[in-house]
Image: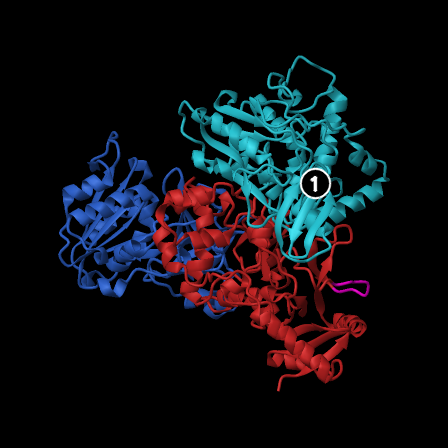
Chain colours: A cyan, B red, C blue
């Protein structure tokens, strides 16, 4: 899979200044964001279910952009990543014409922790291979074969767009995966519980929050960056107290700023060191946006997001 | 002669229960819903501590809570005062006794960095000192490591006793406890039974195995000169930190990151001055009111993290401010690898391009 | 409360009361305070250049230089420019209000080593505050020093601090040269940027120490200007500013390399500056 990605980018190299993709990390379970500026480095590119990080966020923040030359920034996107990218284009935060979007149909990503948990051997992993449905983990103890379905991330189980919604070039065949019957099943399951049970659930889960803000910084659409009101002191919204109240308040602010914008890529949940299922909060807002306006964020670059179309003449909202 | 004793798994739990009556006994405790998430929690009769896995969070919060009250203040009505109120405040020093039980050696060693910074500097931190003096640290010989571990590269190993009062060595059917300090000797008085010769030998073998374990070969012990030479190489820092998200995860999970902020939180009448964990990776950490920021981008901020741990701190205190637990690498959303960056400090100019 | 207590819990402030507030400029106010504990006030000792943390309870703490000289003990003086959260809150306080003070903190100017020499002060805006402490200490021990020249500038006449003292400084034999960036009606002193005026005045470096403080950009050009005039690094002193929280070398934000501005500074010699990692 990675070979064809490299080949395609080699053929487009004259148009490209830098490629945002993934390369091998410190162990065989890690794929990390890569910024490739030399043609010969294209062979480092990796493409498999470990390529979890959503790279579109770099285009809008925390990344020193390349010079405004004639060449483009190539960015590799999975289905979910492409929605984030579309949302950024919709909001005017990324210029479409500066990009070469490399679409990668995706059968789901896996988390290193899930792989570790599924292993029976404790010998150091030397190699990992992916076939259509199987993860092969090679160590001195031999090869362990784990069904992909067992280790695929929660965000991917509810994915409705395994194929990029926007791309200039598509690498690989479109994935033909049945859409989940109800993408909001996880939220609805929680919603079905009595108020007290839901409250207890969120107190337990959000109680672990460290406020390290990895969720915020990994979110491609959390673009306030250094002006985030989680940290402003005047006005002061969230205190520094290590209290549930402040943790909940931060996550509510985070969630509400993404209402009608969140593209459900699930990065917030993936990066959480305390494994708090914070994606559920955003999924709830996505569900509401869908119910209210039949709107899914990040599908069409030309459609203005509903909450960005304030019209004072409309009454009765 | 160092005091040693043996406790079976069952006796261990009842000992912990007895200890918990007199002190807060912090044990690595897996989250019920997410067993991979292990954090230090006070032992209660229902606790099932996990003495194998590396806890997701370091133990620093036991002696250095994420948020702690330094002072409490209040305003009382006083018509004779020009402002109409009288203000009073007092400091709130901690009084609790803690036992940190069953941490990996890297977490115990982390406190040696705190000891230097908070007790040996121009001012001693009384909050840390109060907790530290009363605390007992029982570390376990570590037997589970992964590709992010690098304690060996910073001069340690999985059976390291430095920073521990007592060492806990897993043997068949239980654990051997071995006093390391005088405090540890007293702690073990009247505990358990004399180990059998076989248990003793098994423990000895476990210690030797741990000492011999080499996690990450190339040492990271003296990169300070290389760091200084690299300091102004903006391209180096920009490229090596390009994927960093500039969140605070690495510093929050770190056993040695001790930087903090102080803020007042108040309802207008009552309030407290809080000391909370802060992160040098955050933009606002060095943001000045004038608008100037001496570390304006993640490149300068990450450089400070590397510099603090591997150059500034060792130059001042003779000890690397890193214990090689690997949490900053393992938990990082984009697997930033501080080892690789420290090694690259000394590489040739174009090796990083 | 005493110095011993500051050592015991360095986070615990002295309680102090505002005795006088002086409106220096539209953005700068000077607060004269006394510690509520008379014994602590009597025992309070510090050196020119040392700083204190002023706190408004419920808002927070900020670092300011003690700009009254140790030779004048009735009050402790701090000048505060309104820029952020704490300084805004300080500006809202009135005479009689309570503040917290953690002081003295940080290092000081090498006052003793300056005795018997000529002195040049180069200040800009609020940067005159740390210089004032040293200047007044020298005025109070005038015989110990040779020529004292002060070049002090601000954007406009209204932005100069301590205007009410200028006559007294001159009366004490201080060669005071005032300058503003742009001319304004009624202004009878110099017009021009501080580094330019420095070059024009060109005070001889012979047996002289130079002390400068002001906006970072001014300091940068003044240091270069002094160099051109033949000043050696070890004849030059300046103070650095950084965001601070603890003030006692622990919280980790004011460091420049391994140097902590809060405890190793705020006063640095030109030699010390040169040895520092470039992260200003």
Residue occupying image coordinates x 40% and y 29%: A67
The disc numbered 1 marks a residue on which chain?
A
Residue occupying image coordinates x 68% and y 73%: B169
Viewer-closest of C154 and B158: B158
- How packed mark 1 is, by other alpha carbons closer than 10 Å (few <14, some 14-19, many 20 or more), is many
The dominant secondary structure in magenta is loop
- Residue C131 location in percent, x, y? 30, 52
Viewer-closest of A24 and A55: A24
Magenta residues span B43-49
Does the magenta-highlighted stretch encompass residue B48? yes
Splitting the image into 4 quarters, where does residue C50 fall? bottom left
Q: Residue furthest top?
A: A313
- Residue C246 location in percent, x, y? 49, 57
Q: Can you identify the residue that label 1 sits on?
A: A278
Q: Which corner quadrant holds the C terminus of chain B?
A: top left
Residue B310's place in the image compared with A65, above or below, is below
- Residue B106 location in percent, x, y? 58, 64
Residue A146 falls left or right of residue C235: right
Q: Residue B81: in sight, yes or no?
A: no
Viewer-closest of B265 and A277: A277
Q: Which corner quadrant holds the N terminus of chain B?
A: bottom right
Residue C95's place in the image compared with A109, above or below, is below
Q: Residue B342: in sight, yes or no?
A: yes
Residue C92 falls left or right of residue B191: left
């Amino acid at each position: 899979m990675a070979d064809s990605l490299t080949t395609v980018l080699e053929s487009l190299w004259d148009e490209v200044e830098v490629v945002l993709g993934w390369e091998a990390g410190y162990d065989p379970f890690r794929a990390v964001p890569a910024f490739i500026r030399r043609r010969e480095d294209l062979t480092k590119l990796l493409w498999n279910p470990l390529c979890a990080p959503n790279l579109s966020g770099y285009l809008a923040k925390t990344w020193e952009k390349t010079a405004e030359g004639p060449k483009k920034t190539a960015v590799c996107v999975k289905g979910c990543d492409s929605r984030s990218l579309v949302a950024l284009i919709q909001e005017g935060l990324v210029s479409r014409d500066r990009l070469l979007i490399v679409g990668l149909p995706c059968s789901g990503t896996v988390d290193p922790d899930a792989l570790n948990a599924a292993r029976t051997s404790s010998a150091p992993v030397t190699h990992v291979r992916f076939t259509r449905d199987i993860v092969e983990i090679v160590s001195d103890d031999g090869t362990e074969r784990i069904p992909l379905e067992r280790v695929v991330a929660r965000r991917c189980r509810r994915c409705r767009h395994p194929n990029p919604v926007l791309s200039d070039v598509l690498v690989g065949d479109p994935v033909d995966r049945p859409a989940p019957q109800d993408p909001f099943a996880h939220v609805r399951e929680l919603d079905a519980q009595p108020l007290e049970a839901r409250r207890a659930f969120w107190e337990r889960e959000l109680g672990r929050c460290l406020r390290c803000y990895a969720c915020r910084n990994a979110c491609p659409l959390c673009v306030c960056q250094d002006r985030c009101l989680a940290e402003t002191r005047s006005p002061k919204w969230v205190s520094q107290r290590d209290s549930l109240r402040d943790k909940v308040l931060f996550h509510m602010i985070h969630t509400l700023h993404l209402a009608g914008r969140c593209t459900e890529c699930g990065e917030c949940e993936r990066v959480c060191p305390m494994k708090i299922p914070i994606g559920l909060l955003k999924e709830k807002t996505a569900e509401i946006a869908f119910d209210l306006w039949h709107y899914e964020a990040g599908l069409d670059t030309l459609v203005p997001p509903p909450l960005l179309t304030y019209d004072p003449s409309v009454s009765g909202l | 002669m160092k005091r040693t004793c043996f406790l079976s798994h069952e006796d261990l739990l009842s000992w912990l229960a007895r200890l918990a009556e007199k002190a807060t006994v912090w044990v690595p405790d897996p989250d019920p819903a997410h067993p991979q998430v292990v954090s230090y929690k006070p032992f209660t009769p229902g606790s099932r501590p996990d003495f194998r896995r590396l806890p997701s969070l370091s133990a620093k919060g036991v002696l250095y809570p994420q948020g702690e009250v330094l002072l409490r203040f209040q305003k009382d009505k006083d018509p004779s005062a020009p402002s109409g109120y009288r203000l009073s405040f007092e400091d709130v020093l901690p009084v609790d006794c803690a036992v940190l039980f069953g941490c990996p050696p890297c977490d115990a060693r982390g406190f040696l960095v705190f000891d230097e910074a908070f007790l040996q500097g121009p001012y001693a931190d009384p909050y840390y000192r109060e907790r530290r003096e009363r605390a007992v640290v029982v570390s376990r010989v570590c037997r589970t490591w992964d590709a992010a571990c690098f304690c060996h590269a910073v001069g340690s190993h999985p059976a390291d006793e430095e920073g521990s009062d007592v060492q806990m060595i897993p043997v068949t059917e239980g654990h051997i406890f071995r006093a390391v300090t005088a405090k540890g000797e007293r702690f073990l008085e009247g505990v358990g039974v004399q180990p059998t010769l076989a248990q003793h030998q098994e423990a000895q073998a476990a210690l030797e195995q741990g000492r011999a374990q080499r996690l990450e070969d190339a040492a990271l012990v003296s990169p300070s000169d290389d760091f200084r030479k690299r300091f102004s190489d903006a391209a180096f820092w920009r490229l090596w930190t390009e994927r960093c998200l500039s969140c605070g995860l690495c510093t929050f999970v770190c056993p040695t990151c001790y930087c903090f902020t102080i803020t007042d939180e108040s309802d207008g009448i009552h309030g407290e001055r809080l000391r909370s964990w802060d992160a040098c990776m955050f933009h606002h950490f060095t943001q000045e009111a004038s608008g100037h920021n001496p570390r304006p981008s993640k490149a300068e901020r990450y450089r400070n993290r590397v510099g603090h741990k591997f150059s500034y701190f060792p130059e001042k205190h003779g000890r690397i401010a890193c214990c090689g637990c690997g949490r900053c690498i393992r938990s990082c959303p984009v697997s930033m690898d501080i080892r690789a960056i420290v090694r690259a400090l000394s590489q040739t100019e174009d090796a990083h391009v | 409360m005493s110095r011993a207590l500051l050592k015991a819990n360095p986070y615990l402030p002295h309680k102090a009361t505002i005795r006088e507030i002086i409106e220096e400029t539209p953005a700068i106010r000077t607060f004269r305070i006394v510690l509520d504990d008379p014994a602590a006030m009597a025992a309070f000792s510090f050196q020119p250049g040392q700083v204190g943390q002023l706190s408004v309870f419920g808002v927070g703490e900020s670092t300011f230089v003690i700009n009254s000289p140790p030779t004048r003990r009735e009050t402790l003086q701090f000048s505060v420019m309104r820029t952020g959260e704490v300084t805004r809150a300080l500006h809202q306080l009135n005479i009689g209000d309570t503040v917290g003070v953690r002081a003295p903190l940080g290092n000081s100017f090498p006052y003793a080593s300056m005795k018997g020499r000529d002195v040049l002060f180069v200040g800009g805006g609020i940067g005159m505050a740390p210089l004032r402490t040293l200047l007044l200490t020298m005025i109070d021990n005038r015989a110990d020093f040779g020529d004292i020249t002060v070049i002090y500038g601000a954007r406009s006449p209204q932005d100069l601090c301590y205007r009410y003292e200028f006559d007294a400084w001159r009366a004490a034999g201080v060669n005071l040269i005032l300058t503003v960036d742009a001319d304004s009606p009624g202004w009878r002193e110099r017009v021009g940027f501080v580094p330019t005026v420095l070059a024009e005045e060109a005070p001889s470096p012979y047996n002289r120490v130079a002390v400068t403080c002001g906006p970072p950009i001014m300091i940068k050009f003044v240091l270069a200007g002094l160099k051109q005039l033949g000043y050696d690094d070890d004849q030059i002193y300046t103070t650095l500013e950084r965001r601070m929280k603890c003030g006692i070398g622990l919280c980790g934000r004011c460091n420049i390399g391994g140097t902590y501005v809060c405890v190793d500074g705020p006063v640095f010699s030109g030699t010390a500056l040169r040895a520092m990692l470039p992260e200003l």
